[in-house]
């Protein structure tokens, strides 16, 4: 199972996250505080959970940075603009 997840993560990086951008933007629950937010599912989080916009700073994730192994990519999985695109 871990090998499958690792292959998915590697594939996402290689195609500039195109497959991740195709995932629907939906209501998610912040894994840190439980607040609701709009985001996309990241392979390393339970279904419908992820890092909410509310806790990016608290968790020490760079909002302009690249991939976080735990939480995904800013602008794709969290901190999504109003259009749902990034």
Image: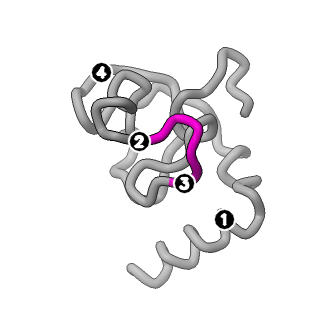
At 73% from the left and 30% from the top, the residue drawn is 85
**Considering only order in the chain, which callout, 1 or 2, is on the residue closer to the N terminus?**
1
The number of numbered discs placed on residues in the rendered structure image is 4
The span picked out in magenta is 61-67
Estimate how packed mark 4 is, as few (under 14), some (14 to 19) or many (20 or more) residues with alpha carbons within 10 Å.
some
Residue in the foreground of this view, choosing between 24 and 42: 42
**Considering only order in the chain, which callout, 3 or 2, is on the residue closer to the N terminus?**
2
**Considering only order in the chain, which callout, 1 or 4, is on the residue closer to the N terminus?**
1
Q: Quadrant of the C terminus?
A: top right
Residue in the foreground of this view, choosing between 83 and 23: 83
SS label for mark 2: loop
The residue that label 4 is drawn on is: 35
Instruction: Measure how far apart labels 2 and 1 are at the Cα level.
Output: 18 Å
Instruction: Measure how far apart labels 2 and 3 are at the Cα level.
Output: 9 Å
Q: Which dot, 2 or 1, sits closer to the camera?
A: 2
Q: Is 62 inside the magenta-drawn segment?
A: yes
The secondary structure making up most of the magenta span is loop
Asked if disc 1 and disc 3 are in contact, CB closer than 8 Å, the reply is yes
**Considering only order in the chain, which callout, 3 or 1, is on the residue closer to the N terminus?**
1
Q: Which dot, 4 or 3, sits closer to the camera?
A: 3
> Would residue 29 be seen by someone viewing this image from the given angle?
no
At 65% from the left and 63% from the top, the residue drawn is 12
At 32% from the left and 31% from the top, the residue drawn is 30
Circle number at residue 13: 1
Estimate how packed mark 3 is, as few (under 14), some (14 to 19) or many (20 or more) residues with alpha carbons within 10 Å.
some
Circle number at residue 61: 2
Q: Is 63 inside the magenta-drawn segment?
A: yes
The color scheme shown is one colour
Instruction: Measure how far apart labels 4 and 1 are at the Cα level.
Output: 28 Å
Instruction: Measure how far apart labels 4 and 3 are at the Cα level.
Output: 22 Å
Quarter of the figure with residue 14:
bottom right
The residue that label 3 is drawn on is: 67
């Amino acid at each position: 199972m871990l090998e499958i997840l690792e292959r998915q993560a590697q594939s996402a990086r290689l195609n500039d996250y195109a497959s991740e951008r195709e995932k629907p933007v939906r209501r998610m629950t912040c894994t840190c505080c439980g607040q609701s937010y709009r985001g996309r599912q990241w392979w390393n989080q339970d279904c419908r959970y992820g890092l909410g916009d509310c806790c990016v700073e608290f968790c020490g994730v760079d909002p302009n940075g690249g991939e976080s192994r735990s939480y995904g990519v800013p602008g794709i999985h969290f901190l999504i603009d109003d259009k749902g695109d990034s």
